[in-house]
Image (tube, grey):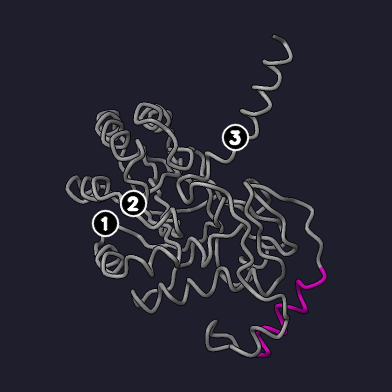
Amino acid sequence: MILLVMQMNKITTLILPLLLLSGCQSKPVMLHAFSTDKTMFRNAPTHLHYSESQMEEILASYDHQEPSEWGERVSGVLTSFETAKKEIALTFDACGGPHGSSVDDELITYLINEEISSTLFVNGRWIDENPALFKKLAENPLFEIENHGTHHLPLSVNGQSAWGITGTTSVEEVVAEMKMNENKIEEYTGEKPTLFRSGTAYYDDVAVDIANSLGIQIVNYTILGDAGATYTSEQVKQALLKATPGDIALLHMNQPDSGTADGVQQAVPILQEKGYSFVQLHNQNLQ
């Protein structure tokens, strides 16, 4: 019996991290989004709005640096904001891909009807599948549009993996994962996003430094709001009700069969009764 329990615990340990990804895909995949050819960007600078000399400067600064940190809480990753008011930020990822390009219409309708300001971190693949809706959301002042990456990859200079997804493998790929979707968002909206959250929310410290050198802030969270859209509505509600001023909640807007919409609808009125308001991230003092 003891052996059986140990085996079941081991299985649970292996399965739970994979469930956290279901907000973006139903099973882990190994993705190699780019060639490892270091001339890639130099041959297509218009895709990134970079000149050859600019890319050479980035390479010279970071190409030989070795990461010393890896995870969700590495140096330079911002997780909250400074405020003297009872304010929190609701952020919603739209991950894209075969299992992540749906739309939680109930959630979006609720946010609009109740005028709940939110920050949407949108992946390039989700935009490709939902262009009309994306444009409509971007035109609504309730929503701040930020960058959730081009191919939803962990941000790494040497191919480290998180939750079964292989990350970017070089300085060039780090830049591409951020900048290609940044440019796509700017083409749709006329505004350049300045905040970035990677697929899986994992980074190494060199990738974070690269982002900062490009004027991009890396933003994660203090509240795991729906655990990759795997939480029940009650779990979402309870997670949000633990909020304190300056917290950033991570939720998903691309899984209509999850408990996210109902949990948000239960939690928001209670938080409002406690005096909380909901703010976007772009004008906050992030820390």
Kindly identify the amino acid type of the residue bearing the numbered disc 1.
Leu
At x 75%, y 63%, the residue is: 158
Depth check, front residue: 161 or 90: 161
Residue 231, placed above or below residue 75? above
Residue 149 placement (x, y as % from top left): 51, 64
- Residues at circles 2 and 1 in contact by the CB criterion of under 8 Å: yes
Q: Quadrant of residue 123?
A: bottom left
Mark 1 and mark 3: Cα distance apart in space: 36 Å
The answer to whether residue 29 is left or right of residue 192 is right
Residue that carries the numbered disc 1 in the rendered image = 142
Residues in magenta, as a range: 52-64
Residue that carries the numbered disc 3 in the rendered image = 15
At x 35%, y 54%, the residue is: 102
Depth check, front residue: 259 or 240: 259
Residue 224, placed above or below residue 163? above
Residue that carries the numbered disc 2 in the rendered image = 118
The answer to whether residue 282 is left or right of residue 47 is left
Depth check, front residue: 213 or 263: 263
Residue 216 placement (x, y as % from top left): 55, 66
Q: Quadrant of residue 59?
A: bottom right
